[in-house]
Amino acid sequence: MKTPYLQIFLCVFLALSSCRRFEQEKVVRQAEPFLPKNLYPTERLPTNFTRVAVLPCYFPDEDSPLLSYVDDVFHQELTKQRLFETVRLTTEQMKVLFGIRRLSSSGQLPETFLSDIEKQTGANGVLLMDLNSYRPYKPLSLSVRAKLVEIKSADFLWAIDETFDAGQPGVIAAASQFQRAIQVNNLSARTTGSATASPRTFAKYVAHSIFSTLPIR
């Protein structure tokens, strides 16, 4: 049988926990949903820019569980924008072409990189994506640097370098908004759980958020 002191302690603990949770929820409700700002977009995509080669995401830890799903997740969200045809290069194709499975956009690219991509895919552009940092536990966090390059001119059409931290109220608000849209539209049967609790769903939110900033056609 619980002693009166233990009962009082439990009541106070539960009351304090409820107050903290209420305050946190209030802060999130009042927060503006996070929008990526550290980006460079051209106003519009060229009319003849119709096919893009999509490279596998780069992450320093090749054994990270993140790489087991992030390529699929990011490609799914990219194709939903319906801006151009995409041609995915597998890690095996990258190994054959460049001797390495994943290339970093911030590293030194092979001298014939763009021409090799064009010959292999017939694409007008190439999309490179780096995952700079990743926190797989609460609060989830993922940093993405991505570049969309026109092959013929080697010009950037779009670039972004942004960190999404689920410890920030604005990110929680935006991720929750995205999660509600998924539930309403039933876009993915594989998506379960909160966008700020599930690493896969959080990655989907991040991909949706960054690709929503791509130039219009």
Image: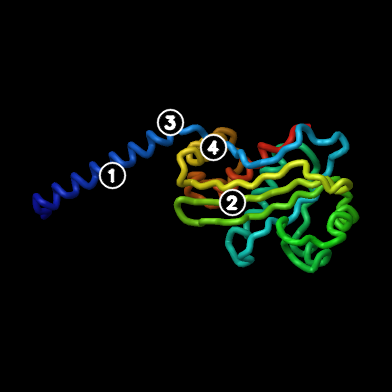
Is there CB contact under 8 Å for labels 3 and 1? Answer: no
Specify whether 56 is left or right of 2.
right
Q: Where is residue 197? Give x, y as percent.
A: 47, 49
Q: Quadrant of the N terminus?
A: bottom left
Measured in 3D between alpha carbons, the distance from the residue under mark 2 to the one under mark 1, in whole angstroms, is 31 Å
Is there CB contact under 8 Å for labels 1 and 4? Answer: no
Query: Which quarter of the figure has residue 51?
Result: top right
Look at label 1 and name its amino acid. Ser
Measured in 3D between alpha carbons, the distance from the residue under mark 2 to the one under mark 3, in whole angstroms, is 24 Å
Look at label 3 and name its amino acid. Gln
Q: Which residue is mark 4?
A: 34
The residue lying furthest to the left in this view is: 4
User: Residue 17 bears which disc, if any?
Assistant: 1
Measured in 3D between alpha carbons, the distance from the residue under mark 3 to the one under mark 1, in whole angstroms, is 20 Å
Q: Which residue is mark 2?
A: 143
Measured in 3D between alpha carbons, the distance from the residue under mark 3 to the one under mark 4, in whole angstroms, is 12 Å
Q: Residue at horizontal 43%, vertical 31%?
A: 30
Q: Which residue is mark 3?
A: 30
Q: Residue at horizontal 55%, vertical 33%?
A: 184
Q: Secondary structure at mark 2?
A: strand
Q: Residue at horizontal 70%, vertical 43%?
A: 78
Single out the mark in the foreground, 3 or 1: 3
